[in-house]
Image (cartoon, helix red, strand yellow):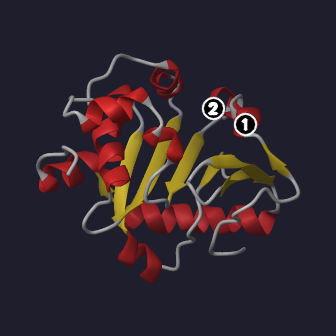
Amino acid sequence: MARSAPRAPAAGTVPFSEIAPLFHEFRHTAFRLETRRGYASDRNSSKWERWKWGADISAEPDNAWRENVREQTAQGKRLERVRLVDQPLTEGQQFLLASGLSNLVAGEDIRNLPRAQASRLGLPEYDFWLFDSRLVARFVFAEDDTTLGVILSEDPTEVAFACQVRDAAWHHATPTADFSGRLGGLEPQ
């Protein structure tokens, strides 16, 4: 499995919307590795603009994502995410840290791992979701950080690699509450 993400839609790329049902249908765990320094979907959102103007976005009203997180975790399922972060944090990472606090309250477990440490661990440089340790959805991005789609795989080698990545990343990552507490303010710089 490659360590870097494809930069153009590859054969087998499907729109992200096609995997949306998986966030309701998974049986035990949904894990995300986030490796990018920022995402176009964030930068193009009204939430980004409010944050840039100094608004507290950590306690935003519920949305469909957080409602689903609550539903799934109430059933005993786990939604987990490890974000690779730079030191110092990029603007996009500062936004995700501030924005993600409401996801924590909903029940998602988000952790942060310094990029240098992830590199030493041999973690890949692409984003993916891993569902129930059986299906990998690897993201494909444009140069401007726009999601072009995902590549789905149930190949045992790719799934096993994603499970190993999850285990190593999770073991070494710091829970967001602890991580953000060490950083202090999360206002844009």
Q: Secondary structure at mark 1?
A: helix
**Residue 128 versus residue 51: which sits nearer the camera?**
51
Circle 2 is placed at which residue position?
A: 23
Residue 78 showing in the rendered view: yes
Residue 88 figure quarter: bottom left
For the residue carrying disc 1, how many other residues have a C-alpha within 10 Å: few (<14), some (14-19), or many (20+)? some
* Residue 142 position (above or below residue 54): below
**Residue 115 versus residue 52: which sits nearer the camera?**
52
Residue 8 figure quarter: bottom right
Identify the residue at horizontal 33%, vertical 36% (top origin): 99
**Which residue type carries mark 2?**
Phe
**Which residue type carries mark 1?**
Ile
Q: Secondary structure at mark 2?
A: helix
Residue 134 showing in the rendered view: no
Identify the residue at horizontal 72%, vertical 61% (top origin): 159
* Residue 175 position (above or below residue 167): above
Circle 1 is placed at which residue position?
A: 19
Figure quadrant of the N terminus: bottom right
* Residue 120 position (above or below residue 19): below
Percent of width and height locating residue 16: 70, 39
17 relative position to 118: left or right = right
Percent of width and height locating residue 56: 21, 29
Identify the residue at horizontal 45%, vertical 79% (top origin): 119
Identify the residue at horizontal 59%, vertical 64% (top origin): 126
Calculate the distance from the C-alpha at mark 1 to the C-alpha at mark 2: 8 Å
159 relative position to 86: left or right = right
